[in-house]
Image: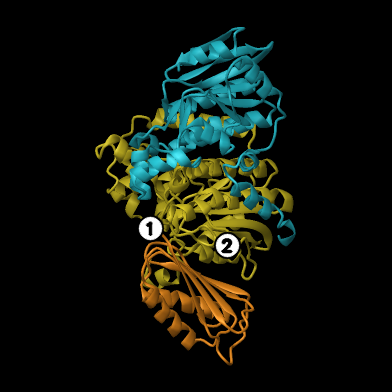
Amino acid sequence: MMELLKFEFPGHRAPLRPMRGSAFAGVVNSGSLEVLIESVDLGGRCQVEVKTSANGFRSTWDAVLEDFFARNRFADIKVSINDFGATPAVVSLRLDQAAAEIMEMGAK
Amino acid sequence: MNVEYALDKICPGGYQIKKDNLVISGHGVCKGQTFAIIGTIDHAAIGIEVAFDLAAAVLEVIQRFPQRPILLMVDTQGQRLTHRDELLANHAYLAHLAKCLELARCRGHRVVSLVYGEAVSGGFFATGMMAERAYALPNAQIRVMALQAMTRVTKISLEQLDELCKTSAIFGPGITNFVRLGIIEDIWQGDLENCLDRALRLPADYDNRAELGCERGGREWAAKVAFRIRMSAEKV
Amino acid sequence: MNLADWRKRDSFYEASARRRILGLLDQNSFQELLGPAERITSPHLEQLGFPVSFDDGVVIGSGLLNGKKVLIAAQESGFMGGAVGEVHGAKITGLLQLALISHVTAVLLVLDTGGVRLHEANAGLVAISEILHAAFRAREAGIPILVLIGGNNGCYGGMGIFARCCDYIIMSEEGRLSVAGPEVIETAGGVEEFDSRDRALVWRTMGGKHRYLLGEADRLVVDDIKAFREVAIELIQKPKPLTLESILQEHQRLGERLVAYGECKDALDIWKKIGIPEFDAIPLMDNDAFHSIVKPYLPREGTEEET
């Protein structure tokens, strides 16, 4: 069964404005995930919603996401994830890909 | 159910069919109107030869009997599963049959199908599902795949699949499921000649199965999603 | 082919659905419809407790192909084996219906699928049938539909039948096209009937080269998105409406095939019968060598004339 996890993070105090309304990365196959990032008015905060097939890993997600928001100057960002058992490394990779896309930075 | 038993009820006025292996072809009379009969018997496994012969029967009607309605009698266990059929491209023979039926419809032939036995995946897809409207007798069974095979591919347990068959119209071979999903227009019972006559009087329409499935509550999203896309015309 | 050439290739096989679309269409011309932000997911997978995808595994939209307006759909290989469920199928059906009302030049379908999504069983089966009916309407209106096959799942099941109902099929050697898959045949008839783990057998029977030699694929290209693009640019200009004449010709061809190759036990027997020299080396030939060797033996009508 799928587990739904929700997180909220304080946004960055001096955030960068995203270049696009939304960005997307990844494919939901076994061992992988897809990440949708959207620019949404959340009063300066960030929200994350994770639907995952691997139950009981809330603290791992917390750590990965905390790290993600520490490395990126985001505020008013919603992250939605469909996960099919990806490792933290793969999760970080897809988060970074989607982040780069919404900021329109980085190589293709 | 054998095909003569069904045809006796559909055309009490008489009919004539010839059987060539698993394929039947001929004609019958329904309330004074002659219609072509094309179909399969004995839970036919549809391989390249059967598909080709069915296509030939459709082409004969197109060429010799302009505008004559066609009743497809469907009883199939699905596509024939052999190396040879795939080697010679069974998908092409099944597609050719589908195209012949499409051509018939484009040229003004009414095409109606009746599942009188069973109808399985590719075999049903290229025959009964090519009709304007598909009908079924009350005891007919339609399926995509046997449950044992499904459990292996989907990793859903046999117990759970059995349970789903009882509760969800998406699973389960019962005809009422297929009516609810909009795949089968209606079940024929009672006066079958009347049923055919009524079917032939309905306007020849575009494919309305998604709307039917939505109205009947079995399949809500197909019609809605397609509708949303059609509404994007100005974005294109 | 040397390492430098191989590196320059933009592999169709490896690419995601979006990457394939972006590589096929003119730069910056793709506009996605019902993209991930719309969250059109599968309610059935949700109910079963399976992971969903925000685009339900198929990317659709519009764009330009060499300046001409086209609609395009590409199945995502990695999600549920590219298989067709209710929502996934409705996206493609809707796209084909949209083609009718938006006067596009053509529809491109990048198919990478095992067929019906069994998790959605009956709904998946009718979804493919609805795609087929919508495609016939588009073809009737003179809009050609091109199918591009070259991904990991091949094109199987009802989608294999559907593909063959479209105007053109462009395949790479890596692609496979059939209705019943190797595992299904082996389950039904035993390993003697079909050893699904014999990859060479699978490709000889269902792969791009054999399909091309049989006349089942219109073009065979290298595994490079640009190669698919070039052929598509040419073929969207040449719709092939279904007429009694064209169907009778096809009927003739299919009948002749039964007679000519009905006794053949393997693709090698067929290739030998066609008369191709070095027929047993066909699986090893690279694309250029393959085409130059087989060309004299494959008269093709329509787009590829014999010189």
Q: Residue at x 52, y 54 (%)?
A: C42
Q: Give the drawing colour for chain A.
A: orange
Count all numbered tags in the image, as a single digit. Answer: 2
Which scheme is used to colour this image of the protein?
by chain
Chain name for mark 2: C
Residue B11 sits in which quadrant?
top right
Residue depicted at x 43% and y 46%? C118
Residue B83 disc label: none
Chain cyan in the figure, letter: B
Label 2 element class: loop
Q: Residue furthest left?
A: C192
Q: Is residue C266 visible?
A: no
Which residue has dot 1 on it? C286
Residue that label 2 marks: C39
Element under label 1? loop
Residue B209 position, x and y percent, is 62, 38
Q: Where is residue C221 shown, x and y percent of the image?
A: 47, 56
Of all chains in the rendering, the one displayed in yellow is C
Q: Position of residue B84 (x, y in %)?
A: 35, 34
Where does residue B163 sit, x and y in percent of width and height? 40, 42
The residue lying furthest to the bottom in this view is: A14
* Residue mark closest to the camera, 2 vs 1: 2
Q: Earlier in the sequence, mark 2 or mark 1?
A: 2
What is the chain identity of the residue bearing mark 1? C
Q: Nearer the viewer, residue B157 or C25?
A: B157
* Residue A51 in view of the camera: yes
Q: CA distance from mark 2 to mark 1?
A: 42 Å
Residue C107 versus residue B168 in the image, above or below: below
Q: Amino acid at mark 1?
A: Asp
Viewer-proximal residue among B47 and A27: A27
Give the crowd class for mark 1: few <14, some 14-19, many >=20 residues within 10 Å. few
